[in-house]
Amino acid sequence: MRRWNLALGLLLFSLVLQAQEDFASDRPGQTYSAAVLPKWGLQLQQGLEWRDFYDRQAENQIVVNQRIVGSNTALRLGLGNHIEVGLAYQLSGINNPTFDNAYRWEGQDPNLMLRFGLPGNGSSLQWAFIVQSSFSNLDYRLSAALNQGPWSVSGNLGFYHDEFVDYTAQWTVLLAYSKEYYSVFAEVYGLSLNSANSDYLAFDAGFSFKLSPRFQWELFAGNQVGVGPAVGLFSNYFVNTGFSWRIR
């Protein structure tokens, strides 16, 4: 037993020592990465989220109370020449504890993604154009990242529309500090100029930990505060965990 414990300890220690390779993931947080995977690079990103939703139309009066459990899976593939394709799928379970404890499960149409690295990318500055669509919606954004030693600032700016929302501006700003096998971050993001009058401002924070050069675990939490035409003032508290795995 001691030999097995020693072998396991040496394995974990070696993984931590190796975990210094750059890792380009869209997790954790809401900001999509400006880094494009190399040719035939393949990466899996998986997130699991618990979200508590409620809104108030009068002081201390809860009008709607929902709990949402969600799974978001994304697979990314580098094609070379600073081009990347991807496929994402989201599954959500919605529960209204005011009435019952049952969850209603809903799956969204798969999202296709294209990511184009823009001219001038380097180790200090990266930027890319990202387009996503399930043919019933369209999400396009500019992603940029500025890296200076262990510190980095990144963000997204773009627009989104679907069959229910004519247009909405979306933005994110993320500050991160990374050292060897871990990274911590804080982020603000939101929707503005929403055609359905459902703007919100949000923040989250968390960390990622590299278990190997190709695998990292992430954990973050946050809150969204906004207004909607049917629900008035609303708030979302959420916790998200998951992983990113560079398969090759």
Image (cartoon, rainbow, N blue to C red):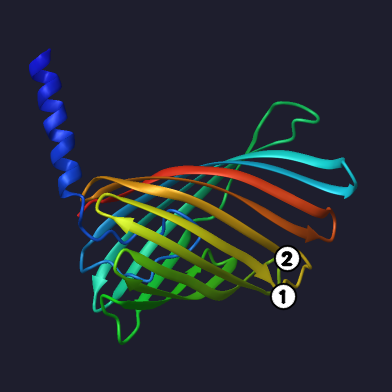
In the image, which disc is placed on residue 75? none
Relative to 232, does residue 193 appear above or below in the rendering?
below
Instruction: Please name the residue shown 79% across and 68% down the image.
Output: 197
Instruction: Please name the residue shown 30% across and 86% down the image.
Output: 120
Q: Amino acid at mark 2?
A: Asp
Residue annotated with mark 1:
193
- Residue 202 falls in which quadrant of the image? bottom right
Left or right position of 133 against 52: left
State which quarter of the image contains the N terminus: top left
Left or right position of 137 against 46: right
- Residue 244: % across, % down: 34, 50
Q: Which residue is nearer to you in this view: 23 or 146?
A: 146
Left or right position of 166 against 233: left
Q: Earlier in the sequence, mark 2 or mark 1?
A: 1
Instruction: Please name the residue shown 43% across and 70% down the image.
Output: 153
- Check whether the beta carbons of the residues at disc 2 and disc 1 lie within 8 A of each other: yes
- Residue 178: % across, % down: 33, 57
Picture mark count: 2
Q: CA distance from mark 2 to mark 1?
A: 7 Å
- Residue 235: % across, % down: 73, 50
Residue annotated with mark 2:
199
State which quarter of the image contains the C terminus: bottom left
Q: Amino acid at mark 1?
A: Leu
Relative to 45, does residue 63 appear above or below in the rendering?
above
Relative to 75, does residue 126 appear above or below in the rendering?
below
